[in-house]
Image (cartoon, grey):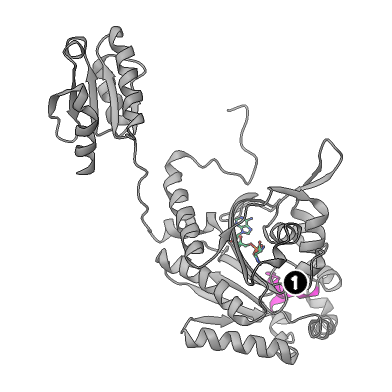
Amino acid sequence: MVEFSRPKGTQDLLPEEQPYWEYVKAQVSGLARQYGFERLDSPIFESTALFARGVGEATDVVEKEMYSFRDKGDNPITLRPEFTAGVVRAYIENGMRVLAKPVKLYSLGPIFRYERPQAGRFRQFHQFNAEIIGIQDPLADLEAMLLAWDLYANLEFQGLSFQLNSTGCPVCRPKYTEALVAHYQDHLDEICEDCKRRIKSNPLRVLDCKQAQCQPVIASAPKIMDCLCDECADHFATLRGYLDALEKPYTINHRLVRGLDYYTKTVFEVWAEGIGAQAAVCGGGRYDGLVELLGGPPTPAVGFASGLERVIMVMKSQGVAVPVLPAPPVFVAYLGKQTRRAAVRLLVDLRAAGLGAQVAMSGSLKSQMRQANRRGARFVIIAGEDELARGEVAVKDLADGKQETVALTALVPSLQEALSAV
Ligand code: HAM
């Protein structure tokens, strides 16, 4: 029994996991920059009121899932349960409204939600988040969707599909909500307790219910597509036109409503094989009212976020290989205590020349050679007293076991040459 264990729903990302993380982070950042997104890092914690207002008081995230506390100055603080509200706050606070539109921003980092942990669902996880601020045209929606799609396509994910819907706007959504609530009122004795609550607090979320008893009621519920105003219907049709022209496969999913209140018009997810019930590898949509809601000028925007744990789960289940993280190629060993100082001098000189190097910190020469092997070194420098006195060291190539004597003055160039050939 260990005395301390990590909090439920968190993970220790051990060294053997890191090749996946390094690779995925490099992929997402590289692609985002290639598509014209610039990085924005907002704080990991923000004022609680920002998320309450931005994400919505009646959402599960705000109602049940936030890590909120008062800091020592008695300020209500929340560990970010998503990026969008913080990015929009930063956009407003830093006067980014004056920038040429669209403002395309991406972020990468930990997110916190007090959820019930299961496969693919954690309490601390990581998102790659992208936002396109300032453009109403569905081209911006398309651009967000393409970034998500191409990320997964570049990772060679199989079985991808876009799930697409519109959530309407403040003009048409109330009419739809009214029709939906009326339908549910007619089926009150058939639905679960949660849905009874939801039709009062957050009616669209009934469409998300997974309970078996609610499925027939969902199936016969009115569809938002039939209630969209002309502007929303046009917007959706134009986006579909772009997707059709690019032959991107998508499924119109009338039940896709998403869990955050700020969405207007487009909502989408990408589902991938390999993460079981947690099929959404990313989710997002348009949020034309959020900038204004948080105190900025009316500004349309669209974006998405992808959970990196889920991306890595898909990679593993689909067998996507990642490059190994190279170990320092040089290991400095020594014979006898007297040579330690010289070994350390060699270590520092090798590093100063830009070579990855480590030094043995204990053990006989035999044990030092074993350490070099275990640490994945290619060359071992053996500093022996007699050789040092002659201005030389032995260099052993662990790949073929060959050992040669090299003059100290020629050590760096000869290692550089040998390593450049590897
Ligand atoms: P979200 O759907 O709540 O949207 O989260 C986006 C993605 O984060 C999900 O598709 C999933 O991959 C991952 N995710 C969510 N919860 C967890 C969890 N507990 N454990 C592991 N992964 C998780 C948002 O957060 C919006 N802010 C996205 C957005 C940006 N919309 C517009 N702009």
Residue 227 within the magenta-colored segment of the rendering: no
Mark 1 residue's CB less than 8 Å from ligand 1: no
Task: Provide the major secondary structure of the magenta segment.
Answer: helix
Residue 295 on image: x %, y %:
82, 64
In the picture shown, does residue 303 fall above or below 233? above
Q: Amino acid at mark 1?
A: Arg
Residue drawn where x is 71% and y is 61% of the image: 91
Q: Toward which corner of the image does residue 240 lie, by quadrant? A: bottom right
Residue 78 in sight here: yes
Q: Which is nearer the eye, 148 or 177? A: 148
Residue drawn where x is 49% and y is 71% of the image: 149
52 on left or right of 135: right
Q: Which is nearer the eye, 107 or 369? A: 107
83 on left or right of 290: left
161 on left or right of 335: right
Residue 206 within the magenta-colored segment of the rendering: yes
- Give the class, few, some or many, for how many residues have Cα within 10 Å of label 1's Cα (few <14, many ≥20): many
Residue 27 on image: x %, y %:
45, 58
Q: Which is nearer the eye, 340 or 122? A: 340
The residue at which mark 1 appears reads as 205
In the picture shown, does residue 34 fall above or below 330? below
Q: Toward which corner of the image does residue 299 lie, by quadrant? A: bottom right
In the picture shown, does residue 413 fall above or below 388? below
In the picture shown, does residue 7 fall above or below 258? above
Residue 241 on image: x %, y %:
55, 89
Residue drawn where x is 70% and y is 52% of the image: 80
Highlighted range, magenta: 203-215
Residue 225 on image: x %, y %:
69, 88
Ligand 1 quarter of the rendering:
bottom right
Q: Which is nearer the eye, 187 or 200? A: 200
Residue 422 in sight here: no
